[in-house]
Amino acid sequence: MQDWGLAAMARRTVPDLPLHGSTQMTVHSLAGVEEAARLGMQCVVLGRELSRDAVRQICARSPIAIEVFVHGALCMCWSGQCAMSALIGRRSGNRGLCAQPCRLPCRFDGGPPGRPLSLKDVSLADHLAELRDMGVSVLKLEGRMKRPEYVAVVTRIYAALLRENRRPTAEERRQLELAFSRQGFTDGYWRGRPGPEMFGTRSDGAPDPEELFREARAACERGDLRTVPVDLSAEIHPGVPARLTVSDRQGRRAEAEGPVPEAARNRPLEEEEIKARLSRTGGTAFRAGRVEVSLSPGLSLSAGAVNALRRDALNTLAALRCALPDRREESLPPLPEDDCSGTDPALTVTLLRPEQLTEELAALSPRIVYVPLERLPEFSLTACRERGVECCALLPRVCTDGELAELERLLAAAKEKGCTSLAVQNIGQLSLGEKPGLSRRGGFGLNVFNSRSLRQCRDWGLESAVLSFELRQEQIRDLRKSLPCEAIVYGRLPLMLTENCLVSNALGCGAKNLRGPCRGDHTLTDRRGEDFPVLSAYGCRSEIENSRVLFLADRPEYRRCGLTFANLRFTTEAPEICVRILERYLGRNEDCPRDYTRGLFYRGVE
């Protein structure tokens, strides 16, 4: 599961049900894993972008099972942080309906058409022993929207590699690539080497490998791939009922009794005859493994009786395998009646660039000014402090364990700089801010979709939470607001947060050069000519913004949704535009962006 509200419901209503954290939770640090464990997860899927060193360090101290994505399609964006499909086509990746717009052609900075967002599929088939040795418990094979034959080929090969503790053969590599690939596979993230070589495409209308898939279908029909091996042991002796015991490889056993065998009048039973009948498991979920028969001489037992023994024993074993364990079922308590709804939301602003924080903007007294923690040293907060404006340090949505020390150093200086609060964007950041004594608010990276998620944010000790911008106005209005709520009502909404830096891939890395390409203005242009700004993000990452700004100043509905705060998110705007937009939302002018969108505020998502 992805949603913390649903997790809280499951813990209360079915407390014995095992819960697994989805990759959509954006868990990518030991602290995130530990928080998932505290919230009842027994297993969690780590972000696909983590290197082997990062996974090894997490596994060494993880209190729960770790699952790693080892084969299949890679999302360009960190899972759980992508809104491109939702905002462009109303099909939400956070709800399992991604339309994969990242696979479409586009241009970077006006260059030739290409597919700079289309990653190759990952394959870690060569690293399974390493994964096992570092303590990974579960391997994830991606099969979304794939044919059953693809699933059969990929799972058969990986199962053999695990069972036989080896690397794939040349033929197995060929079959994996034939089943589906985009110009081969990549293990760039695993090796800690993101870059242009990780990208590839698949030709439109590329034919499926029919011969390989035909063989997979035939193997399934024979039962080679989809059946469970069982051992059978029969005892047929005079004076006692015939008995058959069947057992699977997980230690389950089932028995069946038949009639007492009679003395043979003509041809007595033979051991090979019994073995042959017991091995005929076709049409069931099982296939015969080891078959043993203890048979006294001179006995007779009808073929129907032997078949009934096999059928009854296998049915009993199937029932054992499918039986659910006894689990408690509790009633779900209602949410508390406390209500933190607002009647007229106070305006807050998010600023990404130091020059946007001007005296003129501070003089308009927004309730909160959010500033990226990593750029906080470049900002002057004096004007905000003088006017009593709360300054909140905004954490990056992704912060791996290797980056944590730098952020802790920045946080230690944040209070002295003038910040009084901290906006967390991931469950792995909940403990940050305690040492410097900063209060905590929830950023949009937490993906708050419902009332129970809000309640969980309150239980974490957050003072407010930004709601998902995938919610439409009615959904925002109807939330049980046990915590003050904030919504983005202006600005370019973030579509993607990418581990692969688009600027570095195209122009080279300028991370250590403040005048390098990372600090410049860059754009992606789609097939329709829409320009999407590409901004540098913490950790040599990229953030792709929507081509149009969200604008709701002329729509009073956002003020009637019970929000406490309404956020203006400034990204590419010049300082004077930031001031004019803030004045517009304060009702002091009638400005309107030339090209804007209402986002998902009215239409919502599928």
Image (spheres, rainbow, N blue to C red):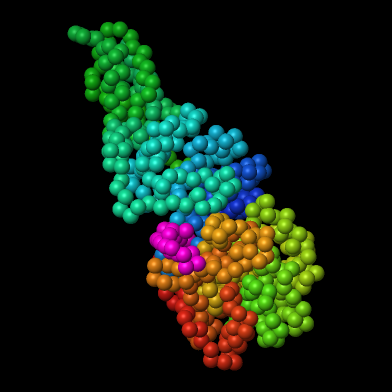
Left or right: 455 in relation to 283:
right
Does 590 appear above or below 53? Answer: below
Does 267 appear above or below 313? Answer: above
Left or right: 194 in relation to 385:
left
> Measured from the top left, where is residue 69 in percent x and y?
51, 46
Image quadrant holding the C terminus, namely bottom left
> Measured from the top left, where is residue 150 in percent x and y?
36, 43
Left or right: 92 in relation to 134:
left
Q: Residue at x 63, y 81 (%)?
A: 575
Q: Is residue 41 or residue 46 the one in the foreground?
A: 46
Q: Residue at x 28, y 41 (%)?
A: 210
Does 511 appear above or below 246? Answer: below
Q: Is residue 196 or residue 57 the one in the foreground?
A: 196
Q: Residue at x 60, y 38 (%)?
A: 135
In terms of secondary structure, what is the magenta stretch mainly?
loop
Residue 231 seen in the current view: yes
Residue 444 seen in the current view: no
Does 419 appear above or below 296? Answer: below
Residues in magenta?
A: 93-116
Most extreme residue toward the right is: 416
